[in-house]
Amino acid sequence: MATRARLTQERSRQRREQLLDAAIALFAEGGSRGITHRAVAARAGLPPATTTYYFNSIDELIDEALSRHIEKWLSDLRHLTKTPADIDLSLDDASGLISAVFAVRSVEIVGVQLSIYLAAALNPDLRSKAAESLDALEALAAQVLGRVGVPEPAALAQSIVALIAGSALRRTSGRQSNDVEALILFRAIRALVTNSLMSDEEVQDTLRVLKPGTPV
């Protein structure tokens, strides 16, 4: 009996995940308007009434699907940026790291993740989850910055995450290749890091050198 119960629980878990995956796939294709009980069940290859068995409403299904996807996205990012603690990193290593992340995360994936994050951030019930994911991403950025020797990395992490978000928007436009976009992001991060190491007086002295019309 115990074995049969476990098998039933496992099948139930798998069906639930199939429905959540199907909801995300439909969301990526047409937003929340394309998510109906019948459409989700059909995409998952399950009977039409399956969604109502596992979820009280379409809104509950959408909310859980978005929340689950954000959590998986964060888990994937942590895995991609994880390096052994005994390996020394330098800022130049960030260029290769960015290129590796770009190679794994296609433009299509980035576009879906952006739309999902925005949908979660605009949903009052999921806004806290979106904020939590942003906090986690900033903490991850601070961890990497600390590994390359940046002092007070948490203070810089917010700006780095803003750059990453902007880079994601650029990538979805298809204007440049992955290698070019990775280089643009790396240079922007390096400039921010360099600026963070300068005193206010050094920054002001540098800015005084600039004059209107001066090429930069």
Image: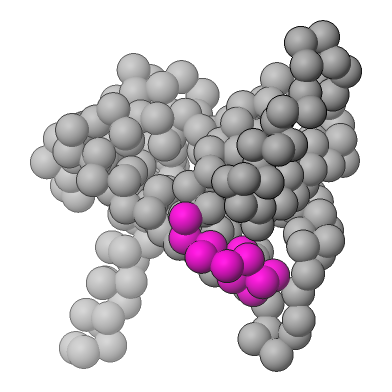
Along the horizontal axis of the image, is 10 left or right of 29?
Answer: left
Along the horizontal axis of the image, is 115 left or right of 207?
Answer: left
Q: Residue 49, position in %: x, y?
A: 22, 38
- At 40% across and 48% down in the image, what residue appears? 134
Q: Quadrant of residue 111?
A: top right
Residue ranking furthest to the left: 56
On whether residue 27 falls in the magenta region, the answer is no
129 vs 34, nearest the viewer: 129
> In this rendering, is residue 169 above or below 49?
above
Can residue 107 be seen at all in this image of the molecule?
Answer: no
- At 51% across and 33% down in the image, what residue appears? 114
- At 28% across and 88% down in the image, what residue appears? 3
Q: Quadrant of residue 213?
A: top right
92 vs 208, nearest the viewer: 208
Along the horizontal axis of the image, is 38 left or right of 108?
Answer: left
Total marks in image? 0
Q: Quadrant for the C terminus, please.
A: top right
Q: Quadrant for the N terminus, please.
A: bottom left
| Magenta stretch bounds | 145-155
- At 70% across and 30% down in the image, what residue appears? 207
Can residue 30 be seen at all in this image of the molecule?
Answer: yes
> In this rendering, is residue 43 above or below 128?
above
Q: Residue 110, position in %: x, y?
A: 61, 37
61 vs 93, nearest the viewer: 93
Q: Residue 117, position in %: x, y?
A: 42, 36
Q: Quadrant of residue 23?
A: top left
What colour-coding does the image apply? one colour
> In this rendering, is residue 151 above or below 32?
below
Q: Residue 155, position in %: x, y?
A: 47, 55
144 vs 42, nearest the viewer: 144
